[in-house]
Amino acid sequence: MNDRKQHVIKMAHQLFIERGFQATSIQDILEYSGISKGTFYNYFSSKNELLIALFKALYGSMETSRDELLIGQDRADLTIFIKQIELQMNTNKKNKLITLFEEVFVSNDEDLKQFLKQGQKRMIQWVFTRFLELFGEEKRPYLLDGAIMFLGILHHNVKYYSIANGSSVDISPVVHYSVHRIVTLVNDAANTGEQLNKPEQMKTWLPDVSQTEEIFKEKLYQSIAMLKNGLNESEIRSIELLDFIQDEFLHSKKSREFLIESVLCSLKADKNLDQQTVASLDELIKDYFARVAEACNLPNVSIKQ
Amino acid sequence: MNDRKQHVIKMAHQLFIERGFQATSIQDILEYSGISKGTFYNYFSSKNELLIALFKALYGSMETSRDELLIGQDRADLTIFIKQIELQMNTNKKNKLITLFEEVFVSNDEDLKQFLKQGQKRMIQWVFTRFLELFGEEKRPYLLDGAIMFLGILHHNVKYYSIANGSSVDISPVVHYSVHRIVTLVNDAANTGEQLNKPEQMKTWLPDVSQTEEIFKEKLYQSIAMLKNGLNESEIRSIELLDFIQDEFLHSKKSREFLIESVLCSLKADKNLDQQTVASLDELIKDYFARVAEACNLPNVSIKQ
DNA sequence: ATCAGTTTTATACCGGCAGTACAAAAGTAG
DNA sequence: CTACTTTTGTACTGCCGGTATAAAACTGAT
């Protein structure tokens, strides 16, 4: 049922990689994936919506595996950030995401355009929050500029490095080089005090829902980090419990409330931990699930009527 | 005759600005410019070729007015470079060049794609040669990386600054900011000795003809600069003569050989100038015209037969 | 096994697109 | 007036994304 739909997305993706999006006709997709036109338009309302589904799948899995690299790691460690960027650039390359992106970015379909713009903004916002962790709160005013410039440098460098050295070349040195550059750049901007974009303006980028989502995640990470700091390395069980919570929330759609509640229960009984922080963590998570339940109910009601 | 063709390009440009390239049909262009389909395909072999003609016209005029800013100026002056970049970014914006560019950059038409890639490489090469003049020969190994990163930073900054402040905002601060950043970046790379792309690889970018053209221009500028250095400010007539030559070669297709020869004659009689340098300049220019004549004759012969 | 409800298929169809073909008309120069 | 080129108008081809619909296949509950 849903397998079939996924299969169509997969087959279409192959065709898009081989020939590009524009050059792939719906007829091609039908023949290649062995379905009829009616079924296709039963799954997707248009060719563009198929593309959106593809992007969502690819970016979703990319984001989770990128975030997984951070579990149980020092969030201020630059080498982890480099690994994260390498991962993303490699999946970009493997799936020809950048080409696909460029090909449809200037499109007449306003929905598709907005979706892609949102994706770019999400990426910048992610780099910004990582920069906050890497450079520290005191550099905040210069970190939105930094995130924007970092992505500009990175993409341009990868592009021309690939032209010069063949597209199969390892892009790891490019990532290292680009990260080194942005470090000096941010420090330079902080020294001279020059600023182009204020980080506050990002608030206007995301819809409230995913914004509070981001804030929640950041608070969660902070609480967990604080608790971990109070532990020494021998208390493995406590660390494992904390890591589990973080991991579970990473797969946001399928976080299992009952499991997390039981883990929280264990944490409350854990005398190695600062119980005040545990309490605030507990409250934070209870709030989150309350909000999720609320968000789930409202649409259901409106559907039933 | 040719006026009509230019008129079609102009009308098409207007439509492209309003609706975008893909969304403008040939039928639209026919109606808007008041010609018939037959005539259109008499002028352009395809819609894409019309776009190439448009790009050539726009980029051509942009490059000459950008180069004109340098006449009689200190080529190492950073403020002139900033003015040049501002000029280019403003015409980009006015003509929606970047949007048009992005819209067709990933295209199935290999000719169009190659043409656009050449355009990008030309731009990087120009920035590189300007950086050579601004940063000095000793920074050469880091200036191709610098040029690539500068354009990445600049375009990204302009993009997000325009999103945040409306597309009608003055981009001058963005240009200043980006230039400041690239200065520290180049010095940083030079200090640490990190290098991604070697400037030599640019040789593989351009066809031989425009490459020797670039080399000629650079030599010309150097000779003229040397001669000027030997003068003091009161010798206006000599300076004017030198500036005239530089100006005349800037409009490369229509440089008038007889005029330049006569000016060279005056220079040879000018006792304010270092006659050895004048002689080498003379030889350089004679070589150039010989090459141009050769290049003109060969195609003519093949046409007549 | 039957039957109702859904999904899938096959096929014909629509309007729009870029590009081709070609004969008639208009313009141009000697 | 003539010979030649340019322009025009129109009809045509083949492909595209998307719609419509009736027949066929599948599904699950009784």
Image (spheres, coloured by chain):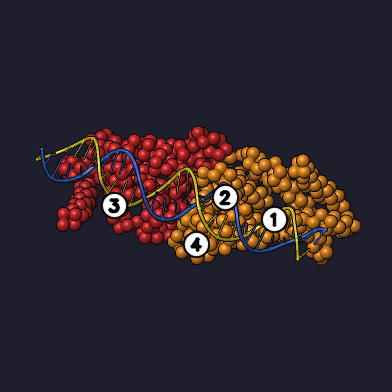
Chain colours: A orange, B red, C yellow, D blue
Q: Amino acid at mark 3?
A: Glu
Say which of B181 and A215 sits in front.
Answer: A215
The residues bearing labels 3 and 1 have C-alpha atoms spaced at a distance of 52 Å
- Left or right: where does residue A271 sit relative to residue A137? right
Residue A75 numbered mark, or none: 1
Chain designation of label 3: B
Q: Earlier in the sequence, mark 1 or mark 4?
A: 4
Q: Earlier in the sequence, mark 1 or mark 2?
A: 2
The residues bearing labels 4 and 3 have C-alpha atoms spaced at a distance of 38 Å
The correct choice, above or below, for A272 with respect to B180 in the image is below
Image quadrant of residue A177?
A: bottom right
Q: Which marked residue is nearer to the observer: mark 1 or mark 4? A: 4
Chain designation of label 1: A
The residues bearing labels 1 and 2 have C-alpha atoms spaced at a distance of 41 Å
Where is residue B263? Give x, y as percent: 19, 41
Mark 2 Cα within 10 Å, few/some/many (few <14, many 20+)?
few
- Left or right: where does residue A297 sit relative to residue B291? right
Q: Amino acid at mark 4?
A: Glu
Image quadrant of residue A205?
A: top right
Q: Which residue is mark 4?
A: A18
Q: Earlier in the sequence, mark 4 or mark 2?
A: 4
Element marked by disc 3: helix
Q: Which residue is mark 2?
A: A46
Where is residue A180? Give x, y as percent: 56, 55
Q: Amino acid at mark 2?
A: Ser
The residues bearing labels 1 and 4 have C-alpha atoms spaced at a distance of 38 Å
Residue at 36%, 39% in the rendered image: B30
Q: Which marked residue is nearer to the observer: mark 4 or mark 2? A: 2
